[in-house]
Amino acid sequence: MASTTMWAMRLAGPYAFMRTQVAVPTPGDLDDGQVLLRVIAGGICGSDIPYFRGVHPIPEVPGLAGRLSAELPGFPMHEVVGEVVASRHPETAVGSYVVGWARGMNGLALQVQEALRRDPHAGDLFVFRGARGDLIKIIWHDGQGACLFTKRLERGRFLWPSLADGVVTVSVAQLSYLLSGIDWRMPQATWRPQASG
């Protein structure tokens, strides 16, 4: 029989973590727009360092009056790579792999290697999209070093394919449409004027 509890780490004070037991999260615990992850890797974001050093007070959790974010299991796991095992987010399917956006080249390369089981140094482009859909990151190794391209749309969202096994392959033309915010699945020729004047 599966256990109903699991271990988690929480912030107990500056530079101090405490291991604790928490209830195993279930799909029924999710609110609209949330996903449940099987965490592959996680860490402390640099923006959290002032909390860990005791420089800033630890913030309260919106909607949970009086509850500090450090009291929640896994704080501050917004630096995370994981596989979606349950989803109530309309555009994030079970089986997708997600990455925390503070992650840079090394973290994305690790995501490619560990989660996608691909070689991040092979010269392929690997594209990741944020949950809101308005930000993408592309990592590519040119044979000398890793390159990272980031684009945030001022309006609209990047249209994302349905994923099989967390991965989809697109052509150069489809990637160009994707980067332009165009529906790459069914591109339409735009209207052009017939005459000037």
Image: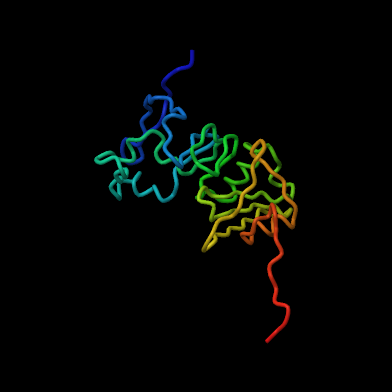
Using the image as rendered, state which of residue 69 and residue 30 is in the foreground: 30
Viewer-side residue, 79 vs 4: 4
Residue 3 lies, in percent from the top left, at 45, 17
- Which of these two is toward me, 148 or 187? 187
Percent position (x, y) of residue 155? 52, 62
Query: Residue 29, image x and y in percent?
Result: 41, 31
| Residue at the top extreme of this rendering | 1
Query: In percent of the image, x 24 and y 40: which residue is there?
Result: 66
Q: Which residue is drawn at 57% across and 38% down?
A: 93
Q: Would you say 193 lies left or right of 56 here?
A: right
What is the quadrant of residue 173 in the picture?
A: bottom right
Residue at image point 62% right, 56% down: 148
Question: Which quadrant would the C terminus be assigned to in this image?
Answer: bottom right
- The answer to whether 194 is drawn above or below residue 55 in the figure is below
Q: Residue at x 60, y 46 (%)?
A: 108
For the residue pair 185 and 99, the one nearer the viewer reads as 185
Q: Residue reaching furthest bottom?
A: 197
> Where, by quadrant of the figure, is residue 11 drawn?
top left
The mark tally for this picture is: 0
- Which residue is the extreme one toward the left? 66
In this picture the colour scheme is rainbow
Image height of 183 relative to 23, above or below: below
> Where in the figure is residue 48, as x and y percent of width and height?
39, 47
From this view, report whether residue 191 is shown above or below residue 143.
Answer: below
